[in-house]
Image (cartoon, grey):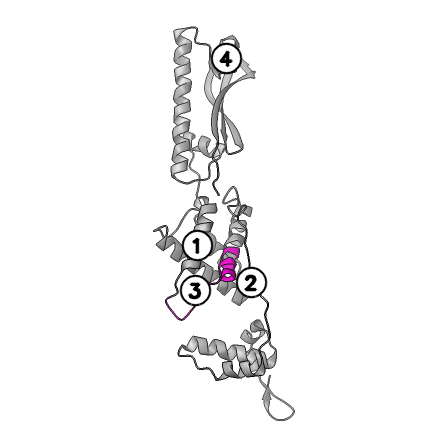
Amino acid sequence: MKTMNTFGIHFILRINKINDGRATIYVRISANQTRCEMAIKKSILPRDWNAVKGMSKPKTDELKTFNNYLEQIRSQLVEHYQKLRLEKSIITADAIKNSYLGVEREHKALGLLLEYHNTNMKSVLAHGTLKNYYTTEKYLKLFLQHVHKSKDIYLTQINYQFITEFEFFLRRHEPVDHQKKMGNNGVMKHLERLRKMITLATKMQWIPQDPFQYFQLKFDRVERGCLTAEELQRIEKKRYPIQRMESVKDLFVFSCYTGFAYIDVMRLSPANVVIGIDGVHTG
């Protein structure tokens, strides 16, 4: 999907700001459904102004010179508009105005957002959920490294194209260890976590608009069946060469026999093991 950029400049006369019979001139900047006005510190007699063309009536050399001055301002604003486009910044009327005036805007980077989210959510999210966010962060950094040839990116540079490119990267990514290629729902979960962090950035006004507004997450519906006793025994007897996978298997089998949820198993400690009435250690 392509986003059409709109941009326009028009000079207007402020009749309500008259001093010694001269009215103040403003330039109105329009860009992508946003608009702002800026005084150019020039004034003119209302009778010498052409409101339709947004310029003075070139009756004298002085007024012709005045029009040349207006065109210089127009050209400079166009240059700043093009500069913002080349930088892939989000273009608004205020952004063009600030660029023209030399007002530097602080840009927040994606790395800062990831750090802010994961640090502040430690006391809110479950350990397993937070661990998934760290995995999404890992893939984002790989994506930036391989596709954008960069270690970080400004949040203002994240747009619909960035999101779709990240999706394609996840779908094509070939793991170097034992893992299989990521399925559709795995890809969508990473995008869902990125969207939640981008929403946080939008609420904090780190970015002016949500780049996910036109992107739809599409999960495949999965019907999960139950393991048979025979299937569980095969899993229990399976031996993995990687210790981490062996530990995951043990946790899964333990959960199957006890009915404990993953989060409850992870919270178990030696203090939870006691001697039952039959004299045997139990939980």
**Residue that numbered label 2 is attached to:** 125
Q: Residues within 10 Å of mark 1 (few under 14, many from 20)?
A: few
First of labels 3, 4 by sequence position: 4
Within the magenta stretch, is there residue 198?
no
Please state the extent of the stretch shown in magenta in the rendering.
176-192
Q: Comparing marks 4 and 2, which lies closer to the viewer?
A: 4
First of labels 4, 2 by sequence position: 4
On screen, residue 10 above or below 270: above
Q: CA distance from mark 3 to mark 4?
A: 65 Å
* Residue at x-position 39% and y-position 33%: 82
Q: Position of residue 69 (x, y in %)?
A: 40, 17
Q: CA distance from mark 1 to mark 3?
A: 12 Å
Q: Position of residue 98 (x, y in %)?
A: 45, 32
**Looking at the rendered structure, which numbered label has been put on residue 50?**
4
Q: Position of residue 40 (x, y in %)?
A: 45, 21
Q: CA distance from mark 1 to mark 2?
A: 28 Å
